[in-house]
Image (cartoon, rainbow, N blue to C red):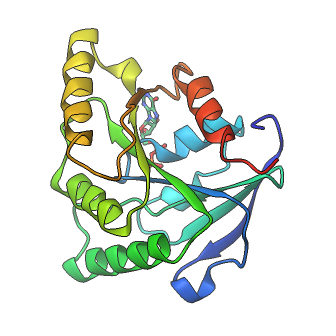
Amino acid sequence: LFARPCEFFHGAQNISQLPVSDAPEVAFAGRSNVGKSSLINALTGQKSLARASSEPGRTKQLNFFDLGGRLVLVDMPGYGYAKAAKSVKEDWQGMMFDYLRGRPNLRRVVLLLDARVETKASDREVMDLFDKAAINFQVVLTKCDDVKPKAEEARYREVAAEMSRHPAAHPVVLPTSSQTGRGIPELRAELAAFAEE
Ligand code: GDP
């Protein structure tokens, strides 16, 4: 599946701009700078596919990528940007909630957490949002190349324990590195299960 070409086909700044599509979708969420663009690029093997969408200051929108006509990847705007005003955060949450609730073809959200830092309040808020929207989400730990094995193990345990408290969470936490490619084949295999026959 991921050998197929992947291309941007739509950006939505609000719910009324969502593309009309019933192709299966997998969305990617995470704090700004968590490594989301890098992960999407590593998954698709396309170096600059998701770059523009994550630059702070750029218009926040949902970016839709078509993967070989069989799966749609959705890049959600990064959250937790320290300087963002409260109203911006509320707008983000409102839009995300509407998208999550109103998208029957959304199969899963991949939630990225940095392996090097603890879970932040904004991450917890987003997980609560997924629970509320009853959207199945799976945590991927990013930048595992940049953390010592012991620290990674501790972070892994912390996150896995947290997942057991979230009804919408997939129990398997996946360590990855876009830099070394660790975990990328596993994530591809996981997501390929959602693709159209
Ligand atoms: P985004 O804002 O979530 O889209 O994050 P980016 O993909 O733009 O990455 C943010 C920063 O983290 C950049 O400086 C990347 O080079 C770095 N980064 C991304 N993935 C990795 C990784 O797997 N390992 C390491 N060490 N750094 C990474």
Tell me the residue at 32%/36% (across/down).
114
Tell me the residue at 30%/78% (across/down).
88
Asked if 107 appears above or below 115 in the picture, the reply is below
**Left or right: where does residue 163 sit relative to residue 57?**
left
Which corner quadrant of the image does residue 148 belong to?
A: top left
- Is residue 2 visible in the rendered image? The answer is yes
- Near-viewer residue (152 or 147): 152
**Left or right: where does residue 129 sit relative to residue 140?**
left
Which corner quadrant of the image does residue 117 belong to?
A: top left
Q: Position of residue 13 (x, y in %)?
A: 53, 80
**Left or right: where does residue 62 sit relative to residue 22?**
left
Tell me the residue at 29%/19% (across/down).
147
Q: Position of residue 93 (x, y in %)?
A: 33, 74
Report the residue that reaches farthest toward the top.
149
Q: Quadrant of the N terminus?
A: top right
Asked if 66 appears above or below 189 in the picture, the reply is below
Find ligand 1 in the image and state its quadrant.
top left
Q: Position of residue 157 (x, y in %)?
A: 21, 25
Report the residue that reaches farthest toward the bottom.
16
- Near-viewer residue (15 or 105): 105
